[in-house]
């Protein structure tokens, strides 16, 4: 009971694991895979909202959502690979849906916040990053 009412985190590494699974899983399995699976249907409708061409924009979104989502999910280079997802969600929220009401653009906003949290938390102890880059893991 004492831990329940404490202001100290219960388990930061478990929280980082859960956040990575949620964010990476949603982007890899839902958003990224959907864009790859329906590539021919989505590409003609994808706009050139940042001025680099619609095809390149779409490929960058696929890279961020599918490949970076996978890397976040498996916790490989987590802080680095969450940055393209953050940029994609920032573009979606501030540019693509700039004139929409908040109800329409609330999902990119939530994802934007989740990317910030994953970046701050990092990958934690239960991660590939920990075993590759941590001195503690190498001592085991």
Image (cartoon, rainbow, N blue to C red):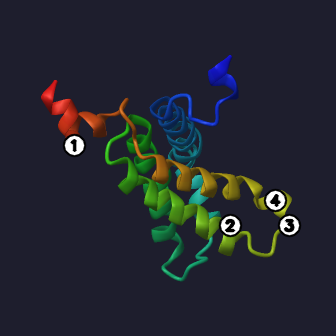
Q: Earlier in the sequence, mark 4 or mark 1?
A: 4
Cα separation between marks 2 and 1: 33 Å
Q: Are marks 3 and 4 in contact (CB under 8 Å)?
A: yes
- Identify the image quadrant of residue 45: bottom right
User: Of circles 2 and 1, which is in front?
Assistant: 1
Cα separation between marks 3 and 2: 11 Å
Q: From the viewer's side, name the closer residue of 18 and 135.
A: 135
Other residues around mark 3 within 10 Å, as few (<14) / some (14–19) / many (≥20): few
Query: Residue 104: which numbered mark, if any?
Result: 4
Q: From the viewer's side, name the closer residue of 31 and 84.
A: 84
- Outermost bottom residue: 51
Other residues around mark 2 within 10 Å, as few (<14) / some (14–19) / many (≥20): many
Q: Which residue is mark 2?
A: 93
Cα separation between marks 4 and 2: 10 Å
Horizontally, is 99 left or right of 43 in the view?
right
Q: What's the residue at 38%, 47% (across, down)?
A: 78
Cα separation between marks 3 and 4: 6 Å
Is residue 47 depicted above or below 131 in this figure? below
Q: Secondary structure at mark 2?
A: helix
- Identify the image quadrant of residue 112: bottom right
Horizontally, is 90 left or right of 118 in the view?
right
Q: Are marks 1 and 3 in contact (CB under 8 Å)?
A: no
Q: Which residue is mark 1?
A: 133
Q: Quadrant of the N terminus?
A: top right
Query: Residue 101: which numbered mark, if any?
Result: 3
Is residue 30 depicted above or below 1 in this figure? below
């Amino acid at each position: 009971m004492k831990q329940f009412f404490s202001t100290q985190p219960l388990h930061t590494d478990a929280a980082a694991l859960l956040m990575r699974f949620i964010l990476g899983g949603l982007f890899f399995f839902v958003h990224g895979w959907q864009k790859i699976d329906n590539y021919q249907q989505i590409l003609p409708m994808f706009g050139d909202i940042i001025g680099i061409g619609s095809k390149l924009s779409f490929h960058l979104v696929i890279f961020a959502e599918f490949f970076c989502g996978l890397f976040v999910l498996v916790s490989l280079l987590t802080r680095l690979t969450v940055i393209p997802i953050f940029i994609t969600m920032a573009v979606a929220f501030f540019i693509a849906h700039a004139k929409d009401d908040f109800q329409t653009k609330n999902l990119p906003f939530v994802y934007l916040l989740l990317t910030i949290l994953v970046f701050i938390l990092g990958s934690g102890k239960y991660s590939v990053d920990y075993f590759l880059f941590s001195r503690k893991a190498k001592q085991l």
